[in-house]
Image (spheres, grey):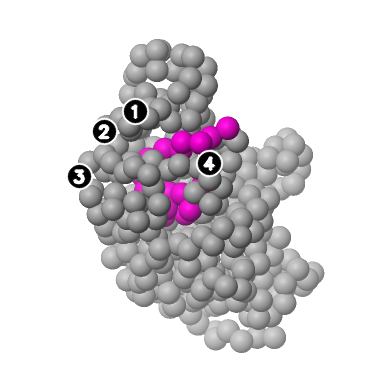
Amino acid sequence: MRNAPKLMRAMMLETAGRPVEPRCLHTPRPGPGQALIRVHACGVCRTDLHICDGELTHPRLPLILGHEIAGTIVEVGEDASAFQVGDRVGAPWLGWTCGECRYCRRGQENLCEHARFTGYTLDGGYAEYAVADQRYCFRLPDHYEFAEAAPLLCAGLIGYRSYRLAGEEVERLGIYGFGAAGHIVAQVAMHQGRQVYAFTRPGDLETQAFARRLGAVWAGDSTVRPPVQLDAALIFAPVGSLVPAALAAIRPAGVVVCGGIHMSDIPAFPYSLLWEERIVRSVANLTRQDGEELLAIAAAAGVRPTVERFRLEQANEALARLRRGEISGAAVLTT
């Protein structure tokens, strides 16, 4: 069934370091195993900023950004039977894996040597329509509006994977960078009985108040120590100097998880911060299992992403405000 027009609006990145530009493009057709999604909402992620600013250096240009796609299926390709026309689905960052490399064989598809990524090496959701491999799409819970569901598909997923890798013995959780990922995973953590300590840019009293409204027991500048030792810390801000700061804030055998795809250089720090079996680790991409688990937990926990909506043609404004730290929660483009 073909419900899509021949042409669609999109915001295209032609060259790194330049704004995205409005384009009128041919609406893509789904190939074998693919689905054509009518994009109702697409989250604006910090990874999009890293691509725009040239900090992630291997995008396929020209490129339609956006990897937090929430919409409805309007057409399916040959051999695509997982979904039907009209189904509500989300398409995340991980868009395809080979299934054959050493990481795929180990169940680590997030590290696939030949992976393709939505809005980076595959066209994404800053458009009215997007094509996605049905195997890497998720069915969206009915009670989420599309704009609410979109941030779950990357900010929520990376936040959840970071949270899970911090370990189960966590009572006091620090979150450095209380934006899209931070405010979602905080709701999961608090639902599971953990105490959340939120760290923001120095002087960002508005975000600190936002964190306390969500239920954080403490919120303050990232330059200060929390009032208690933490069991683990998640770092979502792309600031390398936060690594030694977080190490100084956690207890012996505590874990610091770096959840971003890009971070500024980590400065030298004394070995004493790492000693006593403290751990620093990174998180890369996501797996489909992460997605299924997060969507189920988010629904059960009553997670509600806080979103600020922008029209598709306002993509540059949304990116600029995200760059300046002016978004509470998550920015979302709506078509």
Alpha-carbon neighbours of circle 3 within 10 Å: few (<14), some, or many (≥20)? few
**Residue for badge 3:** 203
The residue type indicated by label 1 comes to Ala
- Contact? badges 2 and 1 (CB < 8 Å): yes
Q: Residues in magenta?
A: 169-189
Residue behind mark 2: 223
Front-most of residues 41 and 49: 41
Q: Residues under labels 4 and 2: Cα distance?
A: 22 Å
Dot 1, crowdedness within 10 Å: few (<14), some or many (≥20)?
A: some
Name the front one of labels 3 and 4. 3
Labels 3 and 4: the sequence-earlier one:
4
- Tell me the distance, in whole angstroms, between the alpha carbons under discs 2 and 1: 7 Å
Residue carrying label 1: 245
Q: CA distance from mark 3 to mark 4?
A: 26 Å
Q: Is residue 18 above or below residue 308?
A: above
Checking the image for residue 162, the label placed there is 4
Residue at 35% x, 18% y is 269
Instruction: Residue at 34% x, 37% y: name it.
Output: 239
- Distance in Å between CA atoms under marks 1 and 4: 18 Å
Mark sitting earlier along the chain (2/3):
3
Q: CA distance from mark 2 to mark 3?
A: 10 Å
**Of 152 and 249, which appears nearest the observer?**
249
Q: Secondary structure at mark 4?
A: helix
Nearest to N terminus: mark 2 or mark 1: 2
